[in-house]
Structures are given as structure tokens and as C-alpha cells.
Image (cartoon, rainbow, N blue to C red):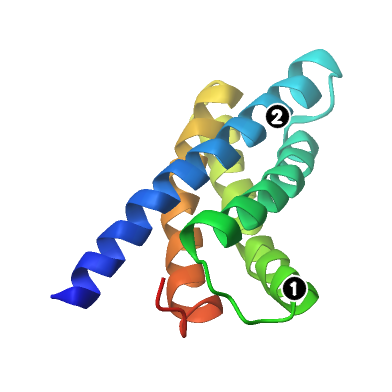
Amino acid sequence: MKNKQQFIKQFISYLFVGGGATIVEWVGFWLFDHCLHIQYLIATAFAFFFSTFANWLFGRLLTFKNSDKNIFLELAQIYLTSMIGLLFNLIIMYIFVSKFNLPDMLSKIIATGIVFFYNFLVRKFIIYKNNES
């Protein structure tokens, strides 16, 4: 029961942390795509880079506390696993924009929602698996 409560607590915390990172990603994507007119897949990658850093920083401070890992090793693991998330994100974006003709911002929202669960599960069960927070 305690493990279930801990999981739910971390998931809710990650919703807020991920929500903040999502805002960073969407605003970044919008700026790169709509203001700077950078191609939507490249804009996705740039925005993802900045949001990953925000997600790591706030996730470390608020959701997965008590990490005893070397900060650089931890950040490297986050970016490595996030690159897989970025690949998922780009594939989803490509499918929804190019194949289903959905607007790029709507596609971005859908992709973010899907990749959110991947990000949480990797952090919970791989990167921070020994944390009790």
C-alpha cells in the first residue's frame, strides 16, 4: 500500500513538474516555429532540449528527491533517455502533421501527452529506481 501511495504521490508531483516543462516546450516550439519560422521538426527538437533541462531540474528538486547520483551522470541519463522520447515525439509529430494533416501545434500537444508517460516511467523505474521520495 505504501508503494502505491508513493507512486501516486510521485506521479502527481511529476504532473506538475511535467506540466511546467510542457509549458517551456510549447512556448519554445511556438517561438521557434511561428516567430522564427524554423521548420517544425527542428523547432520540436530545440524546444525539447530546453524543456528536458527544465524537467530534469524541477524533477530532481521536487519529484525524485534524495538522488545520490552524480549530478552530471544523472543529467546524462536524463538526456540519453530523453533522446528516445524526442524520437517518439518527432515520429508522432511527423505522422500527425504529414499523414493526417493536423495543425502542427495540435500535433505537438498530442505528442507531448504520449511522451509524458514514457518520461515518467523511465525516471521512476530506471533512473531513480532506488529513491524512496
Mark 2 secondary-structure assignment: helix
Residue matched to label 1:
71
Which amino acid, by three-letter code, is at mark 2?
Phe
User: Relative to the observer, which residue lies in front, 90 or 7?
Assistant: 7
Place of residue 15 in the rendered image (x, y in percent of width and height, measured from the top left): 41, 46
42 above or below 65?
above
Looking at the figure, which quarter contains the N terminus? bottom left
Mark 1 secondary-structure assignment: helix
Place of residue 13 in the rendered image (x, y in percent of width and height, measured from the top left): 40, 51
Q: Residue furthest front?
A: 66
- Residue drawn 60% across the image and 51% down it: 58
- Label 2: few (<14), some (14–19) or many (≥20) C-alpha neighbours in 10 Å: many
Camera-near label (1 vs 2) is 1
Q: Which numbered disc covers residue 80?
A: none
Q: Earlier in the sequence, mark 1 or mark 2?
A: 2
Q: Which numbered disc covers residue 29?
A: 2
76 above or below 57?
below
Which amino acid, by three-letter code, is at mark 1?
Ile
- Residue drawn 76% across the image and 21% down it: 31
User: Relative to the observer, which residue lies in front, 43 or 56?
Assistant: 56
Looking at the figure, which quarter contains the C terminus? bottom left
120 above or below 3?
above
Separation (CA) of disc 1 from disc 2: 27 Å
In this rendering, position of residue 65 left or right of residue 13: right
Place of residue 112 in the rendered image (x, y in percent of width and height, measured from the top left): 51, 42
- Residue drawn 58% across the image and 75% down it: 67
Place of residue 116 in the rendered image (x, y in percent of width and height, measured from the top left): 47, 51
